[in-house]
Structures are given as structure tokens and as C-alpha cells.
Amino acid sequence: MALDTVTTATQNPDTKQPFAELGLKEDEYARIKTILGRRPTSSELAMYSVMWSEHCSYKSSKIHLKQFGEKAVKSDALLVGIGENAGVVDIGQNYAITFKIESHNHPSFIEPYQGAATGVGGIVRDILTMGARPIAVMDPLRFGLADAPDTRRLLPGIVAGIGGYGNCLGLPNIGGEIVFDETYAGNPLVNALCVGVMKHEDIKLATAHGTGNLVVLFGAKTGGDGIGGVSVLASETFSDAKPTKRPAVQVGDPFAEKVLIECCLEIFKADLVVGIQDLGGAGLSCATSELASAGSGGMQINLEKVPLRDPSLSPEEILMSESQERMCAIVAPENIKHFMAICKKWDVTATVIGEVTDGERLHITFNGELIVDVPPRTVAHDGPVYNRPIKKPDYVDQLAKSKFEVPLPTAPDEVKAAILKLIASPNIADKSWVTSQYDKYVQGNTVLAQPEDSGLIRIDEQTHLGVAVSTDANARWSYLDPYQGAKLALAESCRNLATTGAKPLAVTNCLNFGSPEDPGVMWQFAETVRGLADAALELGLPITGGNVSFYNQTGAVAILPTPVIGVLGVIQDVRKRTPMGIPAADLDLYLIGKYNGNLSGSEWAYLHGEIGNASPVADLDMEKRLVNFLLDGQPIFESAHDVSNGGLAATIVESVLKNKVGARIELNDVANALFSETPGRVLVSIKDSATNEIVKLAGKYQIPIYKIGTTGGTDLEINLAVISIEELSKAHTETFPKLFG
């Protein structure tokens, strides 16, 4: 096929082009022609199609996401905010932490192992591009029903992909979630979070400044895998009713990424780059246009210089390829020799493919022929913006008015049976079948990991400064009320940090929803963003960035709205952290926080085919006081564990089983007390000698506290119900091996 050059496009304006097959709407194609003053070349069309996809352009979400900036809290800790590859916050002692969460949902459905693995690889490179050393990952996951054939296909492969890639990189996996619900059937959510550390002076940005500076592509060679990968897949629903776009999923090589990380860090240490960008979604199309757009605006690229694994690739395919383990750097000419020497040392392929120019155009040539001539901002940042129709779904008010009846146990044997049923349910059961496949302690700085309330990493071995991270989402609450659901998810994540002794500092998010073309889904999304923006402002936390994943649905069935909220916290001395497990006998157990008996959206209701009337309402003023109570009282707590999914029943069982220490507990209204998931509560254990202090703290922060029992023995006794630790352990641990082998 003859090369489609700019000259050819100008001379042949009526050539038919497959814009619809590439995901562009007719009016979007018309807009491209208006921008260029002609039809696009096939290479330009490829670039616009991937960069204007939902995944890359955020065209349906931009109008709502602006709230994160408009309602942003002023924070002295925030060093880099929304707009870069990842946010950066100051944690003291000249350390900066960068963290971000993203999705790799659709590729993981197509090819579970590689889809999940490259999701880890992509978020790690985002962190790397900020100038940071990646130090830990987390993986919030969602699947269809646990015993469904589709889940049996997906879960083992996805878990193996996450573990395989992360373990090979030598990054500890310190937390996450695994949740099952029928709406995720055929639409697994594979969200990946990475944390990185650097000194303040090491921060790098994705920008291409300086006329004459060189554009260097380094890392793996470009292949045909992932052409149009996440950029196309993530803008497409999976439906039996019509054919779906299923390009080859990206194939990752963790050993190549490990070498690339070390190569980049040495380059950063030598201060050899002006700007840097990883090649993830949309590949070279994204890297070149974003770097140029964020810089002076001009760039010249010689596409034939791109090192290829497959020499048969067309220019369009080279531009769209999402081959992994690739980076693009802007390097001053005087530094190029040193840059190349470091790449050679690490056996990393590096090639100068162009330079920064003084113009305002991105020019790409192939064998001397001009095939791309575009204003880079129109590709990277000024894509379509849609104000999609929004309509509150009928189900919200219908559920609010519906009769909500969930059976509750009363007699001791019924209470015992109910607890054993709950802790054996897939959403509550022990997840070590999964987490044992992840290396939690590689690098030797992991202080806390699954199943603790938050993952905790030591940053400095002399001062013992550390950071904690938690991710949370209750999709059922978001389904009942997405505004409250977002607030509650953020509050829970903050609470999880505070239980371990870490002060919440900053927020990232991964917003997973169905099709934005559904007005009901857009209402869920808009209310979620509003809730998260309002909650972050009220809690005084900056939102540093994140990810939107739309089109998570099969046919007309959308997933539950699932805003996964990640919060980063700082702890001055990791040696003083508070564990979740009861450590010893003869301790007093206190329930901290107000209880209202609301079973809506609870796991107990879900087990009985109910979801509820209305979600709980977030009391963020109380949540702030609770966080301060937990931080102030940290020295007196022997253990602390958040009350969340599964209610107090799950919290007690998990606290008991951690160190096999029993407990004797007395509760009023025992069933509601056990199974309600009323937010804003924590179970703590203290020595009897600390009684006066905890009462004084509760008064200071106006937090209700209730002494509910003591620790010791080999049984869990709740009122007259007695369950041996052996019975609890058996019920809690057997579910996953039975389901997945």
C-alpha cells in the first residue's frame, strides 16, 4: 500500500477512511478535518482515534472532573497535582511520595494473565516517570459470582498475572480488595495502585522544552501487540449483540521492566532528562503528542528510526502500538552521550528518533515523507468534550420505598450459625489463597500488608518514617446513593489509615462505571464525582489524580458503580504502628463510634438477596474526630480494626483469628449489632490500666465508646453463642481453596 502522506491527503480529499471502525464518530471525524484544513492522513487518523478515545481523552468525564480542581483544598503537602502522570506529596525529611491508581479492566477480561500483568507494569512506569523508585503495589479486584464459570476462568489468571509481574519486579504487594457481585460477570475490575519514593529535587515532569533537545525512545522494541489496546478496548462494551473490537492484548516482560527501572533511576540521578513519558495507552501517539503539548509545542519525529520487533509494521501500527516497557525522554544534546552510555550499561535499547523544534506543530516523517502534521494539543488535550445526558435511575427511589426484610438470628445457635455463614461467604472469607501468591515482604521494608487495614511501608531505615495506603469502595452503597457512596469510601479509606497510626495526606481514585451513553450511569458518575470532591474538601485532603474507566458492562447490564478510593498517609515511626489482631489475653475491647443498626448495602443483606433502602449518610465531621481520636490514642491501643464489610461480626472474627486469641463479648440487640455496617466505627483493645485515658480521649473528641468485652481463651463467646477458634478458622479459610483449588 502506498504511503499516505500529508501531500497525498491534500491532493486526495475524498479518500474513504475507516474512522468509525477506529471508534470515531462522524462529527469527530469532521472536526479533525476542520482542525487540519484537510482530511487526515491514515497516520494522523490513527493518532486522533486512540487519543480521542474515552480511555485517553476523558471526553465524557472532563466536565465533571473539573470539580476536583474547583473544590480543591489548599495543601502544603501537595507538590504535583492533577495533570501529570501521578501526584506527588511531601511527607517530610525531604522525601516525596508519588502514588496513583489505574484500571486495566477490559484487557484483563480478554487475556487475564497478560491483561493484569501489564496493568501492573503500566502503573509502575507512571510512577517511575515522576522520578521515583517504585516501592509497593496494591490491587483492588472485582469479579462476578465466586462460583461462576467466568470467574473461575478470570480470577486465577488475573491473580497469577499480578503476582507474576509484581514478584518479578521485586515489588511487595501490600493490600487491595477482592469483591464478588453478579454485575461484574464478564466485566472484572482490575485496578492497580503503585507507590514510589524520591527526594524533592528528583521530581520529573512530562514535558518537552528546549529547541534542539533530542527525543529518545528507550526500552523494549515496538511490536504488534496491543495495537489500539486499552485505548480501543476501554471504550467498548462487551456484548453478544454485536462484534467487539478485540485487538491483541499487550504482552509484558517484567524482567525488561526491572532493568528499565534501574536504568531510568541512574539516568535521573545523573540529571540527564528535561522531560520523560512512558508509553502506555495509545503508545507513541500519546507520548509524542503529550510531551509536545506540555512543552514548547514543536517536535519532529523520524518514525523509521523506531526499533521494531516486527519490521512489517506500518507507520499507523507503530504509532498505535501499546508494546510494554518503553519510555520516551527529552535529552539535551550535551547529555546524550552520557544518557546512551547508561542505557548501554543496562543493555537497554535507546534510539534518538527526533528533536524538539521551535514551531507549534508535531511533524512525523517516515523515510523522509511527511505523514503527520498536527497541532499536538489538539491530539493530546483538546479532544471532544461531551456533556452527556443525565437522569436519575428509577430504581433509586423504588428501593428507598421498598420493604426491606432481612432475617436476623436471635437464639445462640442461630447467632453461631449466622456468624459462620457470614465469615465463609466469598466477600468476607480469608483471601490468603490469593495473597499468598504475592510477595508482600520483598525489599524488606513492608511493615503491614494484607489482611491489615492498610499497607505500611518503611521509607527511612534510620528515622523509621513510613507511609500507609488503603483502597476502599462499597459499590452497593454507591448503587443506593452514589453521592454518599463516594463520601463513605473516602472516609473508610482514611479510617483504615488511622487505625494503623497513619495520618491521611492525599487521595487518588479509580472510577469504574458502565456506559457513559446511558443517562442513568452518567447520573451515578456525576454524583460520585460530586461526592468525592465535597468529601475531600471537607476532610482537607487534596485529590492528586486517578483514572476513569467507562463501558464496564455487558449489553444493557452495567456494573455496580465502583469508585475505588485510595488514600496515602504518613506515620513518623513505623515501629509504633497499631496492628489489627488482638495480641494477648486480659485486654478490654471497646467499640468506638456511633451505631444505628442500618443493614442497607450490608453483606448480610446481600447474602439474603437484598441490597437495601437507602445507603448510610456520611458524617464527615465525626469521621475527622474519629481519625484524630485514633491518632491521638495510638500509644494506648494494643490493636485496632475498622468495622466495614461484614460489620462487627467480621471485625471481631478477623481480630480474633489473627493471633488465635479468643474473646468474650456482650452485645445489646445482638443481630443488628453484629451485621450492621454502620460506618465510622473501630474495634480497639486496650490494657485495663488505660481505661481512664480512653474515656478522657472519647470526651475530648466527642466520640461514643462502648466496652463490649475482654480477650482470652480459645473460644469466641458472643452473649450465649460460643464458637471455637478452630471452628472459626475452618469456616474462614476453606472457601477459596474449595472454589479455586
Image (spheres, rainbow, N blue to C red):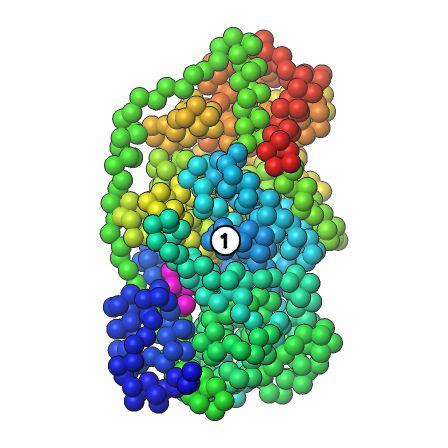
View extreme (front): residue: 1
Decide: is 456 above or below 63. Answer: above
Magenta-colored stretch includes residue 55: yes
Report which residue position mark 1 lands on. 110
Answer yes or no: is residue 593 visible.
no
Q: Name the spot of residue 712 as percent of width and height, x first.
A: 70, 18
Q: Name the spot of residue 386 as percent of width and height, x first.
A: 28, 60
Tell me which residue sits at (59%, 52%) in the image. 113
Q: In this view, does 309 lie to the left or right of 462?
A: left
Q: Which of 484 and 78 is in front in this view?
A: 484
Which span is picked out in magenta?
50-57
Q: Residues within 10 Å of mark 1 (few under 14, many from 20)?
A: some
Decide: is 663 above or below 217. Answer: above
Decide: is 59 above or below 560. Answer: below
Q: Name the spot of residue 20 as percent of width and height, x first.
A: 32, 66
Q: Is residue 535 left or right of residue 499?
A: left
Residue 360, by quadrant, is bottom left
Decide: is 245 above or below 413. Answer: below
Tell me which residue sits at (26%, 42%) in the image. 392
Tell me which residue sits at (29%, 65%) in the image. 25
Residue 183, by quadrant, is top left
Q: Is residue 593 left or right of residue 335?
A: left
Q: Which of 389 and 237 is in front in this view?
A: 237
Q: Name the spot of residue 193 as percent of width and height, x first.
A: 55, 52
Q: What residue type is labelled 1?
A: Ile
Answer yes or no: is residue 219 visible.
yes
Tell me which residue sits at (48%, 16%) in the image. 671
Q: In which quarter of the image is the C terminus?
A: top right
Q: Nearer the viewer, residue 563 or 559?
A: 559
Q: In which quarter of the image is the N terminus?
A: bottom left
Magenta: main secondary structure: helix
Q: Which of 266 and 558 is in front in this view?
A: 558
